[in-house]
Image: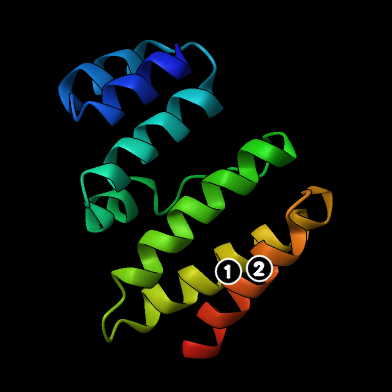
Amino acid sequence: MEQAVECHLQLEQFDEAKGLAKQIESEPVSVICQMRILKAQGSSKELVEQFRDYDFSGWGDDRKGEAYLLRGNAAYFGRGDSEELAALAKRDFDEVLAYAVTLASEEVVKRRIASYLEQL
């Protein structure tokens, strides 16, 4: 069903994507799909508000890494003058870096996040 959500996103059929995402039984997959939908809609503020206090730590490395990156990006780009959002972005990016060791694109991820952190 995750791929079906992605297809609906590509077609900008957000309501259909949301409906499917909420039906996914795997919590990490369902939450990440919901986060991807909000990102695709340009709803960084809503993504942060909805998932600000969400604990991804019990998930597998690939899923929690993506969740931290999605939330960190939303907080980073929506931070404005908010020190709280800047701190959330930094915390999430630090979490991603902790798991980046297992990613094939480790250097790409590290460079992107390092450039974000320099601007905080």
| Quarter of the figure with residue 58 | top right
2 w.r.t. 74: above or below: above
39 w.r.t. 27: above or below: below
Relative depth, front residue between 95 and 62: 62
Task: Say whether marks 1 and 2 touch (CB < 8 Å).
Answer: yes
For the N terminus, the quadrant is: top left
Q: What residue is shown at x 64% (from left), y 48% (from top)? A: 65
Relative depth, front residue between 112 and 66: 112
Asked if residue 76 lies left or right of residue 8, the reply is right
Q: Residues within 10 Å of mark 1 (few under 14, many from 20)?
A: some
Q: What residue is shown at x 28% (from left), y 53% (from top)? A: 49
User: Tag on residue 91?
Assistant: 1
Return the x and y of residue 4 as percentages of the image width and height. Answer: 38, 14
Asked if residue 97 lies left or right of residue 1, the reply is right
Return the x and y of residue 108 as percentages of the image width and height. Answer: 67, 64
- Name the amino acid type tagged 1: Arg
Q: What residue is shown at x 41% (from left), y 30% (from top)? A: 33
Q: Which residue bears the numbered disc 2?
A: 94
- Name the amino acid type tagged 2: Asp
Work out whether residue 89 can be spotted: yes
119 w.r.t. 112: above or below: below
Return the x and y of residue 115 as percentages of the image width and height. Answer: 56, 81
Asked if residue 117 lies left or right of residue 17, the reply is right
Query: Which residue lies most toward the right here?
Result: 101
Asked if residue 1 lies left or right of residue 5, the reply is right
The answer for how far apart the CA atoms under marks 1 and 2 are is: 5 Å
- Mark 2 residue element: helix
User: Tag on residue 108?
Assistant: none
| Quarter of the figure with residue 80 | bottom left
Q: Residues within 10 Å of mark 2 (few under 14, many from 20)?
A: some
